[in-house]
Image (cartoon, helix red, strand yellow):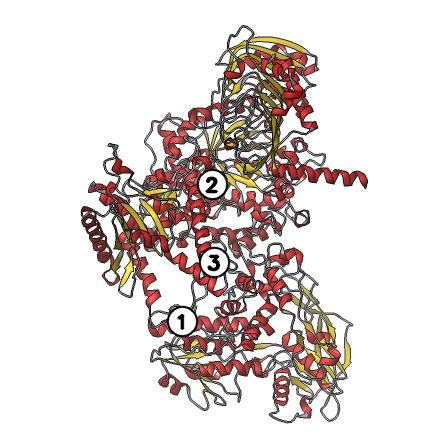
């Protein structure tokens, strides 16, 4: 199918993806059809449009459009068929003819063109609808007539969200998938679908597709279908430039590939099969096997042989079995499953293998992928960590915090600490102590398996242990938003890198990107933003829990990404400051060798080490039913986990040994020598499959011409410019408090270039005292002036930090137990509760601690707060989004979409007259309640604190009239949270009774 | 996709069986069908694995997760379509297959596997009882003709596939009834013969011509056949029995299992009276050979009313479960106890028969054995060592030799001018073609003695190749073997 050649683009770093579920208020799928006229004019005629609420339409709706009887509309149906026996000439001339007909009809006043592939017969085959649609869109654009009409699609082809997304992306305004309608109808007739009538079922399908399209648009940060339509926001993979220029102009296609001839041949072949008379036509539909392996279906690299052989190899430490496994994987070039399958090593210059650096050195460059505790079981997670720590490699915590017990080695010598600590958009358990335990901190900008999307840990998987490391409530589902709320641009990313570097100076900061067109430019930006490591992830990584639309249609192979990143970094002489890492379905030493030659010097593995640990590719990771105890939290199933650290170590050993053999053949003694030497790669000469014949990899293999001084691998460290950080001054003076727990009070001036104040301090406290920090208010700091970004980031327990003045964005990011105060200076003349004192995204990912803000905070206040208590006198839009714990007390106005995706914690809101506008809330997950006695007590206590710390006049006024004013509060309570609290209370009671 | 967590809720069940004491009174099948609900539950135990090892472990590539799901959803006709799409005769395999699929079942790593074979059997039985299995003659004939020699599972599968492709197919069988080993090798208590008859009726109705009691090479010459047909498929099996050339092998009472079993089946079928020579009644029977044929001899002997039944196996007793050298998902060499063993038999392992002892009339009255040990030598086949002082004599009036088959009979292939491989099988290339242009070979004749599933698989694959050979292309299904657990 032509659709499969188009990969969805997604947002990373340069702009944020969007959460169309929690922020539905900004999304819209309605489209208008009709003549746009001159878009630079504003006339009444432009309003004469047919509005379609959901542009995935039923057969009836299409009929209505076709037979529209209204003076302002004229609909014409144009067939998109060609004479199949004429082959490529037939399709080419049919496309031309189609444009001529459309032009004629449009000139005659038609403003709705219905492209229809109905009416196929033995002689007439359908032109791929995407081709017909894109060609109509582009050809009429060239004729300057495109804005005179809208395109409606009537096709048997589209059935998956990706198909629809492509059609809309190339200009369609409405789509009638009539074949799906017919299948639904037939299924209902034969009892395959039960308890629903045809109309309702079709309607459900159409709605579901619309939701799917929103999800696809959101990945690139587009919120309305209106702006997505015609955006062509795809990259083509495996299509020739000539073909793309002719029909999909301005779409990127980098490795060449098939054109109209081959596409027509594929249609012809399918057609022959369908209409062949002398055989068994129609007896059996092909079984498929896209997502689940079937012998006669789509080929998968991890198939019964490769899985069984790998497990045998690592369990019996048997090279022969590994060899069978590696051969099976490497020899897939004929199947064309990966780009690297098309590469061949070249220019052999053999040296004795003894001269190649030992495997023990090589495995230090190996990492296991970011898989959170929660997505995989504690047993599987710790097994990877122990293995990687033993060989000096690195395992990755994934997004989900980590039990502090793992930070120190166990008595038996096993060290369960994840060397890489991940910081993802959910910020689960990202505290000062967590960050302090890392050798590397990874910012996940996107995930190979599902770039541009967030994540969700369903309630049943959040057992008490998982909840404790994520600092959340057991059995309450957790949402990771698609974007990092503190990163909307490259500057914001630089700020986060700076924050994390402050939080742990010894750790490298790693930024994880997903391969897509333009990733080189992004990588250069990230290098300038002072990341120490850049990880380029391939699209084919992924958990069994990824949405199916993402599994296949988003992201590009790492071969393209790593090559582009390497070239851009080398050409800009940035390569030496950066460590380049690569991951995504790396399975053999050959894969590693190719990544290395293309520019990577560190390598990540995820699926393969899990298979080594016992994973049998059940692909049920999201169902909590993994029978081998890996992707499950079910205590019974977890007992089935049979993996051992030795299995993972054996896997890494085999990979390194295979790599060493390749290195010896090519003549490299060290990996450093090998990085970026892409001249050692050549395309396989004998790839006969006709599709491959058009593929041109020269753009990938291109090695930039640079001077001898320009390095191809990492040689120096980034200069993070931490010397001038205010914290060092504080640390110097606060010695008694930090190291001897003596109470101290210090005062400093602060200005807006003083960023991330408190993080280094907290790092020192965490290193000394662990998660417990210092006793409350041990070190009291008063700052006067304007605090820069990230004031009080990751502030540890025992810190009391007060700003008399104003604060910038990210106030209290990742607050880890400290107390933050922002007060209006006493000499100020303005009203505190009418002015903004703290910037956007305050208390993002706060873990625990308190904050008192004597004024209004900006947008996205307390997003992903999981345990901090905050008092504020007013906030902007999207307050308390995705909050999972803690308390927010807001004494003034809130913006729109309050409490979206809020699954835990409590918010108390005040209004002078006790009335609240329900439209401002997102009530999908929360309920509005009156305060009970305990709540009133809590609120009163917080108000008293607020007055004590900030002298807030608003809080004083409320307290002054407490019996009356206490009635003017409401409580925002997440439904699931309430249920979970009740459940926990009952459990506790039962325990006590027992 | 089966039932989520079904594997945690339901246990594996097997078919119930009539009590051994009762069932040995006759030659009928003795299994009791589980209720539909129980079968559905069993289908619900399937985990719909991302990589279904069962499907790979099955030589036919049966779409096991797909039919399990259909059964779970009570969609039996759909299940039947799925099953028939890869297996022409599930009623044979559903009764007789050793079920490598179940050994490869992912659930088997942690729990007893899904009862796949039982599900298979009841899908097809349901199909017959509901009348869903009907003749489906081809719409159009190609004008080409194919002769299939041998009506065992390989020949029959090939015949049906070739007929579906529109060719005129004639099947030659030298026995008086169709089925090959299914008919005269497998005892009725394992598979009643009407199971074959009802399927043959369908094949006949589809237009396949059967010629029985006609031996190609004798009654018709190879040349005649070549002349008459566009292609010939040799699916004559591997019927040469292994002998035991030790002293006394010619005594009365030393019989080949493959003489004993066919004689019995024909008697059950009412074709003849029992010859006392093949009657185990009141005899001490020793079955030499611990395979499936040996089991069939045990079950038959017990039905005759043998005094005692003992089973000798030269190999050591295997472990009860998998060993580390024999990991999942590969076929495990573990102790198997067949239903015939349950009916009463004594089993001896690591035992070698040295001599048959006769009385003065040349009748068998006992045999001499010695215990053996197997010495492992790296890189070589294990070496057999007789244990000194372990000689023993056993009273025995009937010894049944179930030692396997050494290969196909040679005369017919020779008449065709075919080459043999180093193991004595008819040499067939990957495309099942012999050294002669229009002659193909499939089944045990090509691969040596093997399982019924393999025979059906060979028949299907050969049919594809023959169709492609005749027409230039084929729309018959061809099994893909990439990622296979089992060698081709």
Residue B14 or A416: which is nearer the viewer?
B14
Image spot of residue A490 (x, y percent): 43, 26
Residue A719 x/y as whole percent:
47, 20
The label on residue A197 is 3
Say if labels 3 and 1 share a chain: no
Answer yes or no: is residue B327 visible: no
- Single out the mark in the foreground, 3 or 1: 3
Residue B100 percent across, percent down from the top left: 59, 65
Q: Decide: marks 3, 1 in contact (CB < 8 A)?
A: no
Q: Nearer the viewer, residue A447 or B308?
A: A447
Q: How far apart are marks 3 and 2 (CA)?
A: 39 Å
Residue under label 2: A448
Pointers 3 and 2 in contact (CB under 8 A)? no
Q: Is residue A149 above or below residue B388?
A: above
The residue labelled by disc 1 is B465
Q: Alpha-carbon distance for marks 2 and 1? A: 43 Å
């Amino acid at each position: 199918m032509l659709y499969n050649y188009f990969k969805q683009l997604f947002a990373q770093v340069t702009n944020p993806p969007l959460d169309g579920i929690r922020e539905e208020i900004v999304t819209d799928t309605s489209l208008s059809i009709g003549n746009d006229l001159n878009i630079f004019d504003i006339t009444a005629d432009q309003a004469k449009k047919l509005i379609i609420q959901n542009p995935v339409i039923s057969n009836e709706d299409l009929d209505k459009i076709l037979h529209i009887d209204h003076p302002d509309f004229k609909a014409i149906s144009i067939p998109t068929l060609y004479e199949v026996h004429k082959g490529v000439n037939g399709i080419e001339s049919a496309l031309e003819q189609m444009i001529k007909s459309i032009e004629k009809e449009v000139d005659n006043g038609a403003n709705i063109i219905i492209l229809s592939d109905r009416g196929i017969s033995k002689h007439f085959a359908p032109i791929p609808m995407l081709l017909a649609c894109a060609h109509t869109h582009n050809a009429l654009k060239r004729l300057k007539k495109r804005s005179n009409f809208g395109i409606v699609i009537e096709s048997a082809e589209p059935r998956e969200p990706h198909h629809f997304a492509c059609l809309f992306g190339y200009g369609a305004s409405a789509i009638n998938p009539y074949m799906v309608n017919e299948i639904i109808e037939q299924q209902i007739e034969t009892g395959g679908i039960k308890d629903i009538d045809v109309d309702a079922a079709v309607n459900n399908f159409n709605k579901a597709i619309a939701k799917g399209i929103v999800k696809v648009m959101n990945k690139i940060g587009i919120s309305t279908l209106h702006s997505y339509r015609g955006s062509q926001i795809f990259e083509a993979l495996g299509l020739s430039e000539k073909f793309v220029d002719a029909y999909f102009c301005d779409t990127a296609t980098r490795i060449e590939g098939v054109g109209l001839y081959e596409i027509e041949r594929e249609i012809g072949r399918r057609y022959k099969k369908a209409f062949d008379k002398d055989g068994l036509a129609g007896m059996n539909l092909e079984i498929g096997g896209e997502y689940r392996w079937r012998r006669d279906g789509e080929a998968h690299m991890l198939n019964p042989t490769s899985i069984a052989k790998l497990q045998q190899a690592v369990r019996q430490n048997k090279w022969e079995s590994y060899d069978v496994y590696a051969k099976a994987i490497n020899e897939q070039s004929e199947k064309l499953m990966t780009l690297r399958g098309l590469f061949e090593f070249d220019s052999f210059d053999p040296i004795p293998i003894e001269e190649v650096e030992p495997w023990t050195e090589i495995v230090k460059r190996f990492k296991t992928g970011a898989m959170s505790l929660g997505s995989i079981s504690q047993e599987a997670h710790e097994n990877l960590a122990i293995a990687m720590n033993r060989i000096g490699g690195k395992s990755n915590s994934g997004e989900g915090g980590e039990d502090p017990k793992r930070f120190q080695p166990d008595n038996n010598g096993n060290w369960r600490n994840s060397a890489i600590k991940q910081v993802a958009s959910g910020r689960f358990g990202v505290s000062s102590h967590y960050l302090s335990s890392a050798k590397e901190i990874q910012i996940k900008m996107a995930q190979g398996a599902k770039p541009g999307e967030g994540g969700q840990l369903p309630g049943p998987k959040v057992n008490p242990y998982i909840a404790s490391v994520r600092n959340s409530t057991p059995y309450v589902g957790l949402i990771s938003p698609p974007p990092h709320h503190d990163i909307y641009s490259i500057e914001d990313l630089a700020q986060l890198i700076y924050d994390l570097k402050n939080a742990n100076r010894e750790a490298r900061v790693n930024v994880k990107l997903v391969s897509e067109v333009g990733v080189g430019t992004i990588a250069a930006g990230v290098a300038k933003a002072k990341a120490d490591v850049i990880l380029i992830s391939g699209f084919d990584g992924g958990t069994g829990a990824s949405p199916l639309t993402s599994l296949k249609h988003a992201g590009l192979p790492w071969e393209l990404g790593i090559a582009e990143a390497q070239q851009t970094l080398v050409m800009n002489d940035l390569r030496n400051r950066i460590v380049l890492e690569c991951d995504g379905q790396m399975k053999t030493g050959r894969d590693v060798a190719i990544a290395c030659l293309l520019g990577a010097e560190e390598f990540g593995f995820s699926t393969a080490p899990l298979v080594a640990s016992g994973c049998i590719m059940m692909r049920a990771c999201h169902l909590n039913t993994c029978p081998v105890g890996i992707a499950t939290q079910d205590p019974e199933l977890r007992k089935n986990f049979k993996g051992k650290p030795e299995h993972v170590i054996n896997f890494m050993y085999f990979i390194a040994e295979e790599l060493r053999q390749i290195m010896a053949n090519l003549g490299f003694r060290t990996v450093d020598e090998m990085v970026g030497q892409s001249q050692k790669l050549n395309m396989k000469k004998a790839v006969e499959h006709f599709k491959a014949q058009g593929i041109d990899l020269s753009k990938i293999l291109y090695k930039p011409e640079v001077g001898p001084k320009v390095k191809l691998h990492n040689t120096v460290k980034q200069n993070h410019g931490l010397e001038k950080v205010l914290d060092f001054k504080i640390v110097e003076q606060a010695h008694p408090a930090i190291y001897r727990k003596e109470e101290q009070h210090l005062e400093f001036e602060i200005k807006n270039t003083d960023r991330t104040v408190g993080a280094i301090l907290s790092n020192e406290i965490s290193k000394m005292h662990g998660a417990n920090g210092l006793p409350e208010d041990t070190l009291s700091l008063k700052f006067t002036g304007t605090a820069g970004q990230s004031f009080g980031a990751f502030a540890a327990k025992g810190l009391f930090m007060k700003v008399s003045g104003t604060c910038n964005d990210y106030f209290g990011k990742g607050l880890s137990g400290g107390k933050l105060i922002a007060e209006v200076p006493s000499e100020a003349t303005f009203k505190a509760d009418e002015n903004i004192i703290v910037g956007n995204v305050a208390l993002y990912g706060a873990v625990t601690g308190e904050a008192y803000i004597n004024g209004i905070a900006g947008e996205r206040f307390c997003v992903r707060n999981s345990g901090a208590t905050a008092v504020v006198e007013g906030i902007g839009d999207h307050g308390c989004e995705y909050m999972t714990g803690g308390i927010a007390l807001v004494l003034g106005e809130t913006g729109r979409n309050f409490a979206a995706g809020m699954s835990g914690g409590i918010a108390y809101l005040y209004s002078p007259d006790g009335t609240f506008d329900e439209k401002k809330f997102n009530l999908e997950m929360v309920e509005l309640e009156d305060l009970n006695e305990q709540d009133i007590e809590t609120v009163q206590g917080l108000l008293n604190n607020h007055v004590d710390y900030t002298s807030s006049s608003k809080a004083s006024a409320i307290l002054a009239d407490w019996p009356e004013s206490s009635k003017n509060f409401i409580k925002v309570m997440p439904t699931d949270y309430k249920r979970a609290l009740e459940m926990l209370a009952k459990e506790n009671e039962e325990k006590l009774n027992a | 996709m089966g039932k989520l967590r079904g594997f945690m809720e339901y246990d594996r069940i097997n078919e119930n069986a009539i009590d051994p004491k009762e069932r040995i009174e006759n030659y009928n099948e003795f299994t009791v069908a589980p209720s539909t609900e129980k079968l559905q539950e069993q289908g619900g135990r399937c985990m719909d694995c991302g990589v279904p090892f069962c499907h790979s472990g099955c030589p036919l590539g049966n779409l096991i997760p797909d039919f399990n799901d259909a059964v779970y959803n009570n969609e039996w006709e759909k299940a039947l379509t799925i099953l028939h799409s890869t297996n022409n005769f599930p009623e044979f395999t559903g009764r007789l297959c050793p079920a490598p699929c179940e050994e490869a079942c992912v659930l088997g790593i942690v729990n007893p596997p899904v009862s796949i074979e039982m599900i298979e059997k009841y899908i097809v039985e349901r199909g017959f009882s509901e009348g869903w299995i009907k003749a489906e003659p081809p719409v159009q004939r190609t004008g080409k003709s194919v002769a299939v020699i041998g009506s065992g599972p390989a020949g029959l599968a090939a015949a049906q596939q070739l007929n579906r492709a529109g060719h005129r197919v004639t099947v030659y069988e030298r026995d008086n009834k169709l089925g090959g080993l299914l008919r005269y090798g497998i005892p009725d208590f394992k598979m009643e013969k009407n199971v074959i008859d009802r399927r043959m009726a369908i094949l006949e109705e589809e237009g396949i011509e059967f010629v029985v009691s006609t031996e190609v090479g004798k009654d018709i010459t190879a040349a005649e056949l070549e002349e008459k047909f566009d292609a010939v498929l040799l699916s004559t099996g591997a019927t040469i029995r292994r002998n035991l050339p030790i002293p006394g092998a010619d005594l009365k009472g030393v019989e080949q299992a493959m003489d004993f079993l066919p004689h019995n089946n024909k008697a059950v079928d009412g074709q003849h009276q029992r010859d006392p020579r093949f009657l185990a009644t009141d005899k001490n029977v020793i079955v030499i050979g611990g395979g499936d044929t040996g089991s069939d001899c045990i079950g038959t002997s017990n039905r005759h009313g043998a005094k005692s039944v003992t089973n000798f196996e030269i190999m050591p007793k295997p472990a009860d479960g998998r060993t580390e050298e024999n990991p999942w998902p590969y076929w495990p060499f573990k102790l198997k106890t067949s239903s015939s063993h349950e009916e009463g038999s004594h089993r001896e392992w690591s035992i070698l028969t040295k001599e048959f002892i006769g009385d003065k009339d040349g009748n068998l009255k006992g045999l001499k054995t010695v215990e053996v040990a197997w010495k492992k030598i790296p890189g070589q086949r294990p070496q057999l060592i007789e244990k000194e002082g372990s000689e023993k004599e056993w009273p025995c009036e009937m010894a049944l030799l179930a030692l396997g088959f050494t290969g196909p009979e040679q005369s017919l292939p020779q008449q065709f001018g075919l080459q043999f491989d180093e193991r004595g099988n008819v040499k067939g290339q990957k495309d099942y073609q012999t050294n002669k242009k229009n002659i193909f070979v499939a089944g045990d004749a090509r691969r040596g003695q093997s399982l019924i599933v393999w025979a059906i698989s060979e028949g299907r694959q050969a049919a594809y190749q023959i169709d492609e050979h005749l027409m230039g292309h084929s729309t018959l299904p061809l099994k893909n073997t990439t990622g296979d657990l089992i060698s081709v």
